[in-house]
Image (cartoon, rainbow, N blue to C red):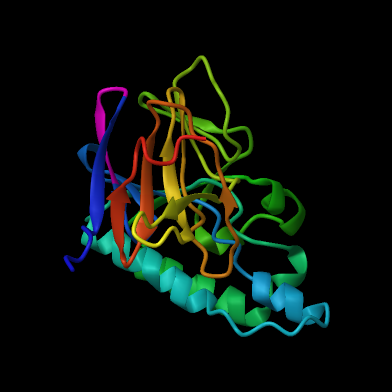
Amino acid sequence: MMRPPLSVDVEVVGERLTARADRALVWRAQRTVFIADLHLGKAATFRGAGIAVPERGTAEDLARVTTIVREEAADRLVILGDFFHARQGRTASITEALAAWRASIEDVEVLMIRGNHDRSAGDPPASARMEIADNGAVCGPFVLRHEPGIDAAGYVLAGHTHPAVRLEDPRTGQSAKAACFWFGAACGVLPAFGGFTGTAVVRPQRGDRMIALVGGGAIDVSGRVVG
């Protein structure tokens, strides 16, 4: 069986974007990487509440970001909200991991769009050297937001919903859920980047581009998962 490709290119409002299997979206013409919904500190928050969950490494998630930024030779990283999960999860170890991570990409501009979790968890420390936008930002033809929607100022790139598709094996009739990128007519939604995040199956419209993340690769399943 052939291994699926590691990325799929999608044309959006005349710009070529690359949806990577590692859940990052890249605008190579502008050396920009987009990610959404890291939810750093989520496992620590659950354990602090007495819920037994396995350790999920913040350092590992941040290392994945560094790898992508370096592979793409990016000048800018945009985080489309929910960088932190909750204030209770902002432990000393996470603060240390964040400092080490920022040092690893010290030459990269970082823009964070506040998400609903960030508003209660609080912003990253000033030492993280991030530009913070509360109500979104405009970047060329794109409007950068946390929550999906329609905006007259441009094509929206967002996160928040942790989109997934349900794929069915025609040979067995069995189905499985897979995280995905969802590009509609006016809004594109990125999958959750964090390693300890859930997903929600979405109902695309005809004509939407759907890139499913399966088997370590990225597969265009447009037209096969219309709701």
The quarter of the picture where residue 108 lies is bottom left
The residue lying at 75 percent from left, 64 percent from top is 87
Return the residue found at the far left. Answer: 2
The quarter of the picture where residue 11 lies is top left
The residue lying at 64 percent from left, 46 percent from top is 115
Q: Is residue 90 visible?
A: yes
| Residue 104 percent location from the top left of the image | 36, 70
Nearest the camera: 60 or 73?
A: 60
Is residue 99 left or right of 17 when viewed as pictured?
A: right
**Magenta residue check for 15:** yes
Return the residue found at the far top. Answer: 152
The residue lying at 44 percent from left, 20 percent from top is 154
Return the residue found at the far right. Answer: 49
Image quadrant where one finds the N terminus: bottom left
The residue lying at 60 percent from left, 51 percent from top is 200
| Residue 158 percent location from the top left of the image | 51, 39
Check the image and report above or below for 66 versus 204: below
Is residue 126 left or right of 116 when viewed as pictured?
A: left
Q: Is residue 75 visible?
A: no
Nearest the camera: 23 or 59?
A: 23
Is residue 88 left or right of 4 when viewed as pictured?
A: right
Nearest the camera: 98 or 3?
A: 3
| Residue 190 percent location from the top left of the image | 46, 46
Check the image and report above or below for 31 versus 150: below
- The magenta segment: 13-18
Check the image and report above or below for 211 versus 88: above
Nearest the camera: 7 or 79?
A: 7
